[in-house]
Amino acid sequence: MRTAAALMKRWEVEHEYEFRKWANEIPALHFKNEWNVHVIPPFAGAIARFRIEYKGKFVSCYLDCYDELGYFGEPYWEIYPYKDDIFRCKMNDTELLMQKIDDILEGRDLEESEEEKDE
């Protein structure tokens, strides 16, 4: 059992990062049935974290609501790896998030788009 001091520290972190507020504001995510989704405790300033595995590939994803892990200017999701880098999108842009995750898991993130070929 945790000590009173440890519980107080946890409450302070939950309060500082507005966990109850975000519990109501984080949008639902609609994962594909065949994906294995592993929920990971938040660390390093993330509000939420998870890892998705499918066909031997993986995607790491976190939600940063305070620009503590990067700068986006509003709450955002970040996924890695994406085209040997990262991909970020607005917290409420969940359809785009799921599409980019699917692209990674299906290997489409490494294909050049027509726009990239023209550059």
Image (cartoon, rainbow, N blue to C red):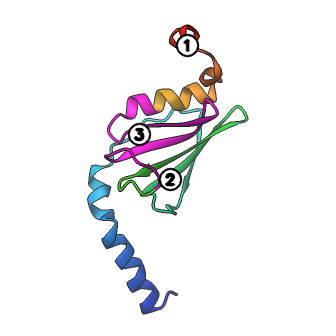
The alpha-carbon separation of the residues under discs 2 and 1 comes to 29 Å
Mark 2 element type: strand
Give amino acid for label 3.
Leu
Relative to 7, say whether 33 is above or below: above
Amino acid found under the numbered disc labelled 2: Arg
Disc tally is 3
- Residue at 33%, 43% (x, y): give it: 27
Foreground label between 1 and 3: 1
- Left or right of residue 80: residue 46: left
Percent x, y for residue 96?
41, 28
Dot 1 amino acid type: Ser
Q: Which mark is drawn over residue 29? A: 3
What is the spatial separation of the Cα atoms under label 1 and label 3, in whole angstroms?
A: 26 Å
- Between residue 27 and residue 86, name the one nearer to us: 86
Camera-side mark, 2 or 1 = 1
Give the residue number, with chain letter if any, for mark 1. 113
**Which of disc 3 and disc 1 is earlier in sequence?**
3
Quarter that holds the C terminus? top right
Q: Which residue is mark 2?
A: 49
Q: Earlier in the sequence, mark 3 or mark 2?
A: 3
Q: Nearer the viewer, residue 44 or 51?
A: 44
Magenta residue span: 69-97
